[in-house]
Image (tube, rainbow, N blue to C red):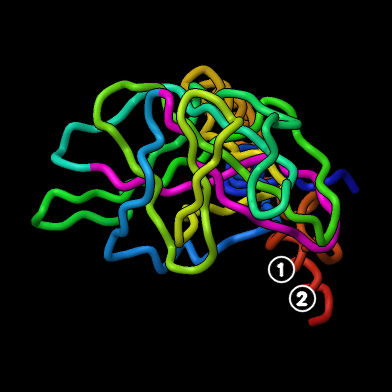
Amino acid sequence: MTACPRSTAFWTGALWMLALPAYATTLFSNGVNSQTPPQAGVGIYGSNTSASSFSISPAATLASVSFYSLECCGIGWSGTINYYLFSNNGFYPSTAPFAQGSASSYKQSTIYSDAATNVVNRYDFNLSTAVALSANTTYWIGIRLSDDGSKPFWNLVSSGISAHTGSDFNSWNLQTGTGAFALFDTTFQTAPEPGSAWMLLVGTGLFAGAGWKRPVSSRHIECGDGPSRPADHEVAAGLAGRR
């Protein structure tokens, strides 16, 4: 018996499953769902860098970051995210990052707005290169945005402390509260590009066409989960022979 061709719905679902994002493990989150109403931290635009501390357990590889900004007045920000990872130096970040990079491709989502034109945006971005982190070790993540559009602040959560500095990393100042952020071990995935979507549709059409061309009369013989079903005229002939 030949195998039964899968239905169009099956292949459509299978193809689109390839485009779904992978499930990520949250390595760290400091209460990013409780940062509203917004609390202004330090500006993270231009030459201003703000850093917040964290530790993870167990050891893992950091691949992507979400952080939350506080922006105002409907101006909007669109630029480059610069990020830095520092080791701990007492109660401060070290004077030089052990990893850094920039992201010009990211996802922006507005999660809060009010009548006073305060807006909290979430930015999801991938690290240029994934970074291995040790367990139970204090690190700091620093964020600085290119000075385009609005002048965002890192939205604060009430716990912990954060550090900020100007043009270099040699002089850090501490502030109560940490920037709202989360860390993940998997890169963020995006929806299929237009070309990929068309290829999926074409592939689905080919599968559908293959199933449509198969003769209907043979389906009850070649398909199905159980034994083949005899044709109606064969059943009628068998009944007549018993009389």
Q: How far apart are marks 2 and 1 (CA)?
A: 5 Å
Res. 204 in view: no
Q: Is the magenta stretch mostly helix, strand or loop?
A: strand
The residue type indicated by label 2 comes to Leu
- Outermost residue on the bottom side: it is 243
Q: Quadrant of the C terminus?
A: bottom right
Q: Position of residue 227 (x, y in %)?
A: 86, 64
> In this orientation, which residue lies closer to the viewer: 90 or 182?
90
Residue, disc 2: 239
> In this orientation, which residue lies closer to the viewer: 159 or 112?
159
Q: Position of residue 168 (x, y in %)?
A: 55, 25
Q: Is residue 64 magenta?
A: yes
Element carrying mark 2: helix
Disc 1: CA contacts within 10 A as few (<14), some (14-19) or many (>=20): few
- Outermost residue on the front side: it is 171
Disc 2 vs disc 1: Cβ atoms closer than 8 Å? yes
Please, is residue 241 above or below residue 52 in the view? below
Q: Which residue is drawn at 34% across and 22% down?
A: 147
Residue, disc 1: 236
- Left/right placement of residue 30 relative to residue 22 reads left
Element carrying mark 1: helix
Q: Which residue is drawn at 48% across and 47% down?
A: 67
Please state the extent of the stretch shown in magenta in the rendering.
Answer: 47-71
Q: Position of residue 184 (x, y in %)?
A: 66, 50
The residue type indicated by label 1 comes to Ala
In the picture, residue 83 is in which quadrant? top right
Q: Where is residue 186 in the image (x, y as percent from the top left)?
A: 70, 44
